[in-house]
Amino acid sequence: MEFTMIEAGWLSLIPPVLAITLALITKEVYSSLFIGVFSGTLIYAFAGGGSIFTAASTMFDLMYSKMADNAYMIIFLSLLWGVVILVSKSGGSEAYGRWAGKKLNSKRSAAIATSLLGLLIFIDDGFNSLTVGTVMRPITDRLRISREKLAYIIDATAAPICIIAPVSSWAVAVASEVSEEGGFNVFLSTIPYNMYALMTIVMVFVIAVTGKDFGPMKKAEDNAAKGLQNSAADIQDMASDDDKKEEGKSAQGKVIDLVLPLLVLVVCAILGMAYVGGFFEGVSFSEAIGYNPTGGLTLGAFAGLLTAFVLYIPRKLMSAKQFISYIVEGIGNIVPPMLILILAWSLGGVCRQLIGTGVFISGFVSNSNLPLGFLPVIIFIIAAFMSFSMGTSWGTFGMLIPIVTMICSADGAGVYLVPALGATLAGSVYGDHCSPISDTTILSSTGAECPHIRHVETQLPYATLVAVICGIGYLISGFLLNPWVSIVVGIILIILAVNVLNRFGEKMGR
C-alpha cells in the first residue's frame, strides 16, 4: 500500500513525543502508542483537507500494511510460543532439574549451572525466567544460595541473552523495527554494541565463579548461608488442582524433551534462513540469512513443533487434544507483545511514510553543532529512563528505533546508526531489568519464589554498576566507532569493581 508523504515540519514531532510522554505519565504503552499513531494520521489527513474519518481510515490502512509486511514474523512468534508452552508442559525442564541436582554439590557449580541454563534458553525471556527458576530452585535451596541471588541470575540471563540471540522473539522484533530491508543484518551488527547485554552476562559469571557479592545481595547470601532462606510460603500459591495434576504427569519427562525441540528449532531456523535466501542455489551465506530471516525462522519453529509432536504424543506425555490446546495457549500469550509491535510499526510508518518526521529531524541534526560521538551514551540514558518508567523494553525500543534511524539519516550521521541502535537496545534492557513493574522482573522473582521487592532491591546495585560501566563504554565507542575497546575495558572494570566492592562491604561489616 502506497502513501504520499507530506512535510509537516515541527508538527511531525507530535506523534512520537506524544506517545513517549503519555507512556511515561500513564505507565501504559498500548493506549499511548495508539494515540501517537492517531495523532499522526490526523495531521496527515487535515493537511490534505480530509476529516477525522479520513484519519481513522488512513490509520487502519497503515496498520494493515504493516501487519502484511510483517506477516511472517507474526506467524513465527505464534509458532515459537507454541513450542515454548509445549516444552514447558512436557516435563523436560523438571527432568533437567533432577539430572542437574545429582551433579551439583557446591554453590559455585550451582550458580554456574544456573547461568548456563539461562544462556541455553535464549528463545524467549518469559520462558527463560519461569523454566530456569522451576528447574534450579530446589538445587539452589539445598546448597543455600539465596532466592535473591537465584532471581538475579534468572533475570540477568533472560532479556540480556534474548536481545543478542539471532534466533529469538526479540531478534525479529528489533529487526522488524530497524528498516524495510536489511533489518536483520543491522540487528546482527548491533550485537557488539549492545554493551549492557554483554556486560551483564560477564557480571553474572564473575559473581558465580568468584562468589563475591556486595550490597543487599551480600546480606541475603549471608542469611541463606545461616539457613534463614525465604520460605516458599512467602509467595502466594496460585497453582490450581489442574496444575498439580500436570506436575504429576511432568515426572515422566526427560532431559531430551527440553533439549531436542529447542535444538531442532535453532538448527532448522539457521538452515531455513539459508534455504529461503538461496544459499543452496549459490548465494553467499551472509546474504542468504538476511534475505527473509523471519521466513527461515518460521520454518525452524515449525520443525520444533513437529519434533515435539513426535517426541511427546507416542509416549503419552500429552494427548493430541492437549497438544493443540497448548499451542493455542502459547499463541494467546504472545498477543500482548504482538499488539505493542503492531502499534510500534504503525508509529514508525506514520513518521517515515506520512508526515516526514525523518526529514525534519535529519535536517535539524545536520544543522546542529552537537558532537555526534556523544549520541550513543545520550540515547542509552534516554532509553534506560523510558524503559524503567514504563517497565517494557519492547515498548521502549519500538518508540525509539524509528527516531534513532531518522537522526542517523542526517548528513554525516550514518556511521553512528549501528552504535546508536546498540545503545537503544542496551538502555531498553537495563531499564526493564531494574523496573519493578517489568514483566520480566516479576517473572524472575516468581520463578525464584523470591519476594518481588527483595529481588528489585538486591538486583539494582548490580545492574546499575553494569550500566555505569556501559556509559563509559559508549563514550569510548561513540568516538572510536569500534566496540571492542569498550568491551575489553568493560570486562576489566567489572572484575575490579566486584572485588573492590566486596572487600569494602566486608570491612564495613566488621
Image (cartoon, rainbow, N blue to C red):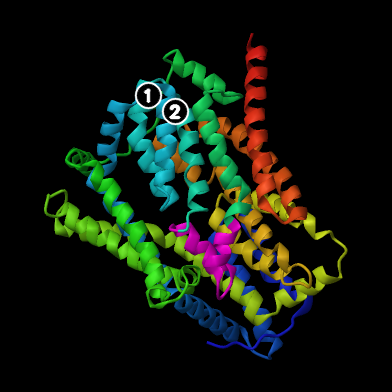
Disc 1 + disc 2, Cβ < 8 Å: yes
Q: Say which of 31 and 209 sits in front.
A: 209
Mark 1, Cα crowd under 10 Å, few <14 / some 14-19 / many 20+, is some
Mark drawn on residue 141: 1
Residue under the point 46% across and 73% down: 70
Residue under the point 51% across and 34% down: 205
Residue 451 x/y as whole percent: 46, 31
Residue 37 x/y as whole percent: 60, 72
Q: From the viewer's perspective, is residue 98 above or below residue 405?
A: above
Which type of secondary structure does the marked residue at label 1 adopt?
helix
Which type of secondary structure does the marked residue at label 2 adopt?
helix
Q: Which residues are magenta?
A: 167-190
* Chain-order first, disc 1 or disc 2: 1
Residue 182 in the magenta stretch? The answer is yes
Q: Which amino acid, mark 1? A: Asp
Image quadrant assignment for residue 203:
top right
Give the overall secondary structure of the magenta segment. helix
Residue under the point 60% across and 33% down: 462
Q: From the viewer's perspective, is residue 452 above or below residue 316?
A: above
Residue under the point 57% across and 24% down: 213
Mark 2, Cα crowd under 10 Å, few <14 / some 14-19 / many 20+, is many
Q: Say which of 218 and 292 sits in front.
A: 292
Q: Which amino acid, mark 2? A: Arg
In the picture of the structure, the residue carrying the numbered disc 2 is: 147
